[in-house]
Amino acid sequence: MRITNAAEYAIRAVLKMAMEPDRVYTATELFVDIEAPQKFLSKILQKLAQKKILSSTRGIKGGFKIKKPIDTLTLFDIIEAIDGPMALNKCLLDGFDCSREKYCPVHLIWEEAQLQLKKILTQKSIKDIVNEYRKMVGKNT
């Protein structure tokens, strides 16, 4: 399993926006700050808005703003919003009927690994990550 470039850019954008969560950001200023291709980032931001992670406003003072509270938003939420359901193997996707599940020697290992990955990606909120970053670089929260 690999996180896509789109998910990586989405994470960068949300973390940047979480530094000032009440501010409206344009795609143009975000693409410069997070080093992402502008057209690609615009599509990513629209997808995050569709998934209710961001809100978007059109017009001269328009742009994107974090909609979901950053104290409940996680890396897992962002990755799934962009890449869809996360699964280490297709047999772990909801609705996939695996004929080998009952006798597969690694099925339980895939399940445990996926549970641990989800646990790690959901244990800290975006707010926690931003606060840790601020401490790391010496900025108060």
Image: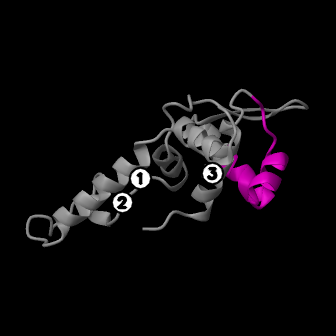
The answer to which quarter of the image holds residue 111 is: bottom left
Q: Does residue 32 belong to the magenta stretch?
A: yes
Q: Name the foreground residue: 112 vs 140.
A: 140
Secondary structure under tag 3 reads helix
From which residue to which does the magenta span run? 23-45
- Percent of width and height locating residue 63: 79, 36
Tell me which residue sits at (8%, 70%) in the image.
103
Q: Is residue 73 left or right of residue 136?
A: left
- Percent of width and height locating residue 96: 27, 58
> Which residue in the structure is indicated by mark 1?
85
Marks 1, 3: nearer the viewer? 3
Tell me which residue sits at (55%, 52%) in the image.
82
Q: Name the foreground residue: 69 vs 27.
A: 69
- Percent of width and height locating residue 29: 84, 47
Marks 3, 2: nearer the viewer? 3
Q: Name the foreground residue: 132 vs 36.
A: 132
User: Quick one: label 3 or label 2, which is nearer the N terminus?
Assistant: 3
> Which residue in the structure is indicated by mark 3?
10
> Which residue in the structure is indicated by mark 2?
87
Asked if labels 2 and 1 touch by Cβ distance under 8 angstroms, the answer is yes
Count of marks overlaid on the render: 3
Tell me which residue sits at (46%, 47%) in the image.
76
